[in-house]
Image: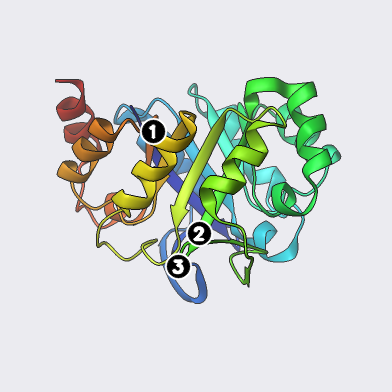
């Protein structure tokens, strides 16, 4: 199971939100590139980058910084946030991104997802952001009637093989992941599910590994030092 540090970029800074609320922001660094290099130096094998400005605007807003991160680290990075068209996907891959995560566009434009999978195969990941059991879009501001398992199955028919599942109610709260929803998604789809939201302890990571998660994205818990990345990597290797 991959342990993937998260770098959320807003206004050129590395921040964390509480339950996706842009009004409840904590700034952890004004140097996202330096933060990326720090996580790499501690043993991270992949980084998860979110363009929060892009997610809110519906278009990439931090491409230059994402490109700088991609060119500064030796490990692969995955990027999500505001990626709504094939042109944006192409720009990200051109600047060195390894995987692109589609959220809102996956719900609103499934044909684009199909085309993206055809062109870029396993490098396309779909983000399933759920609040109270329903998928949310538009920077987590708009709730839909789609349920995560049904949505994942529909995406798999289009060629998607990997998903990032985030429980919005848990994100940035330092509580615990929604293990029940994650297990249902993993068990029902047999797809590669990367867990996100509420991961606060190494025990949480061990449970996720037992559930069969392909990866775990850790954000706030790394910045608050609730989880020590090097220790977590060592523990999960045992």
The residue nearer to you, when weighing 8 against 127, is 127
- SS assignment at label 2: strand
Tag 2: Cα neighbours inside 10 Å, few (<14), some, or many (≥20)? many
Q: Which of the two discs, 1 and 2, labels the residue nearer the N terminus? A: 2
Q: Is residue 85 above or below residue 14?
A: above
Q: Are marks 1 and 3 in contact (CB under 8 Å)?
A: no
The residue nearer to you, when weighing 31 against 205, is 205
Q: Are marks 1 and 2 in contact (CB under 8 Å)?
A: no
Q: Are marks 2 and 3 in contact (CB under 8 Å)?
A: yes
Tag 3: Cα neighbours inside 10 Å, few (<14), some, or many (≥20)? few
The residue located at (55%, 49%) in the rendering is 128
**In which quadrant of the rendered image does the C terminus lie?**
top left
Distance Cα–Cα, label 2 vs label 3: 6 Å
Residue 200, percent from left and from top: 23, 53
Residue at label 1? 215
Q: Is residue 13 above or below residue 117?
A: below
The residue located at (28%, 35%) in the rendering is 211
32 sits to left or right of 99: left
Residue 49, percent from left and from top: 54, 44
């Amino acid at each position: 199971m991959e342990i993937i540090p998260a770098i959320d970029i807003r206004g050129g800074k590395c921040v964390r939100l509480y339950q996706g609320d842009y009004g409840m922001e904590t700034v952890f660094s004004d140097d996202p590139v330096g933060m990326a290099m720090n996580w790499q130096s501690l043993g991270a094998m992949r980084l998860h980058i979110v363009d929060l400005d892009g997610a809110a605007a519906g278009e990439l807003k931090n491409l230059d910084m994402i490109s700088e991160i991609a060119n500064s680290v030796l490990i692969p990075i995955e990027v999500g946030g505001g990626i709504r068209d094939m042109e944006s996907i192409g720009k990200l891959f051109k600047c060195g991104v390894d995987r692109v995560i589609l959220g809102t566009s996956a719900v609103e434009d499934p044909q684009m997802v199909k085309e993206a999978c055809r062109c870029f195969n396993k490098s396309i990941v779909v983000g399933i952001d759920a609040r109270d059991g329903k998928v949310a879009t538009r920077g987590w501001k708009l709730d839909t009637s789609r349920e995560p398992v049904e949505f994942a199955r529909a995406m798999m028919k289009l060629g998607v093989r990997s998903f990032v599942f985030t429980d919005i109610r848990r994100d940035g709260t330092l509580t615990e992941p929604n293990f029940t929803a994650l297990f249902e998604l993993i068990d029902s789809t047999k797809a590669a599910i990367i867990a996100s939201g509420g991961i606060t302890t190494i025990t949480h990571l061990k449970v996720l590994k037992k559930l069969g998660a392909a990866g775990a994205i850790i954000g706030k818990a790394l910045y608050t030092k609730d989880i020590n990345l090097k220790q977590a990597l060592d523990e999960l290797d045992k």
